[in-house]
Image: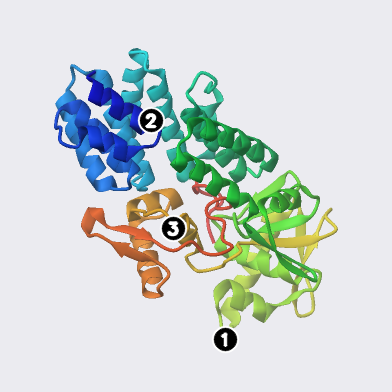
Amino acid sequence: MDSLIDAAARALATGDPLGALKRVALRNDAPALALRGIAMAQLGDLARAKILLRKAARAFGSRQAVARARCIVAEAEIALVSRDLSFPTKALDAARTALERHGDRANAAHARHLAIRRLLLIGRLDDAERALATFDAAPLPPALRAAHALVIAGIAMRRLRIKTARAALAAAAQAARAAGIPALLAEVASTAALLDTPAARLIAPGEDRLLLLDEVETLLASPMLVVDACRHVVREGEALVSLITRPVLFALVRALAEAWPADVSRSALLARAFRAKHADESHRARLRVEIARLRTKLKAVADVTATTRGFALAPRRARNVAVLAPPVEDQHAAVLALLADGEVWASSALALALGESQRNLQRALDALAASGKAQSFGRGRARRWMTRPVPGFTTTLLLPGPVTGDPSGSS
């Protein structure tokens, strides 16, 4: 490695992309192309960075497997940052294997982190935890130790293990300071700020207020019966009833929980669950069927009792009932939650992260664009979507994971 390439690599390692470009901007050999690509990525020109890294990978060829693998890992990182979650994971896995085989543990570890962060973005927490379980970050350089701690914090925040998340963020901040990379310090700070941002809204008798993540953790650990409108489940301690694939049943139980301990009239339930303005006998018959289904679903934690004018929720053990709702409710709140991270997203990546069809997702994006809540730029495959962060809106932390189906059918 010549002195200019060596100096440019050191500049990039310390977060100085302009210093790196001064040394290699006019060179087109493979190492210089790779370093220029990474520098452009650090400066935010991701499209140009991707082109340079692909050129570098081709120039290195199969004979320089390590250098080529490093380019693939760098391109995967750009894909992750630009929310292009369709980047081929097999290529990243092959690059990681090549780096491990040739003893480049630091870049192999970075490749593993990218794969885990992708799993986090698409809500596959169990897979992310399994991949992280056998990972030893102690021998890694400070920048990768910070990235490792950020992944731990991300999983802990989504699992509502806030004490673990705070400890991981403290470790990430310490490692980021040791690395001395401003962008890494900013990422740690923005992640830590989520702990002080309202994540949900509590609706209970005589109470309607915003909650931080640690307050959500306390609520869900309490003996209270909680109708969780963020994840579409009903909880009581360790008992959990998922209604994520049963929207009608969830609409009914939420209406009953919001009114508890009072009852809800049949007409109000019909309007809430079926949007029926003028109920006829067929609507009332369907309501009786859905209430019976709801009783079956909730039998371990609550009953639904009939009253003179409608129905009421009757917890079996819990003394109190509360609804945990998103802080900002919108028809397309899940899409907004992902866009609110301030990054640009491809529609295919949004569909993958939410487990939605591309067609349904595009309808949601068009509706958000028409209402001024989202905007796009680019065309075709290069089209990306974004929105301004919504005040008081913690992004993806309380979104449900991918739907795996409900063997009992859907409502």
Amino acid type, callout 2: Ala
Q: How dense is the environment of label 2, judged by Cα within 10 Å: few (below 14), some, or many (20 and up)?
A: some
Q: Is residue 301 above or below residue 143?
A: below
Q: Is residue 86 above or below residue 62?
A: below
Amino acid type, callout 1: His
Distance of mark 2 from mark 3, alpha carbons? 30 Å
Name the disc covering residue 13, or none: 2
Distance of mark 2 from mark 1, alpha carbons? 66 Å
Name the disc covering residue 339, or none: 3
Looking at the image, residue 96 sits to the left or right of residue 209; the answer is: left
Across and down, in percent, residue 227 comes to 69, 59
Q: Earlier in the sequence, mark 2 or mark 1?
A: 2
Q: Nearer the viewer, mark 2 or mark 1?
A: 2
Distance of mark 1 from mark 3, alpha carbons? 37 Å
Per the image, the residue denoted by label 1 is 278
Residue sitting at the far bottom: 278
Residue located 65% across and 45% down the image: 160
Who is closer to the viewer here, 132 or 282?
132
Q: How dense is the environment of label 1, judged by Cα within 10 Å: few (below 14), some, or many (20 and up)?
A: few
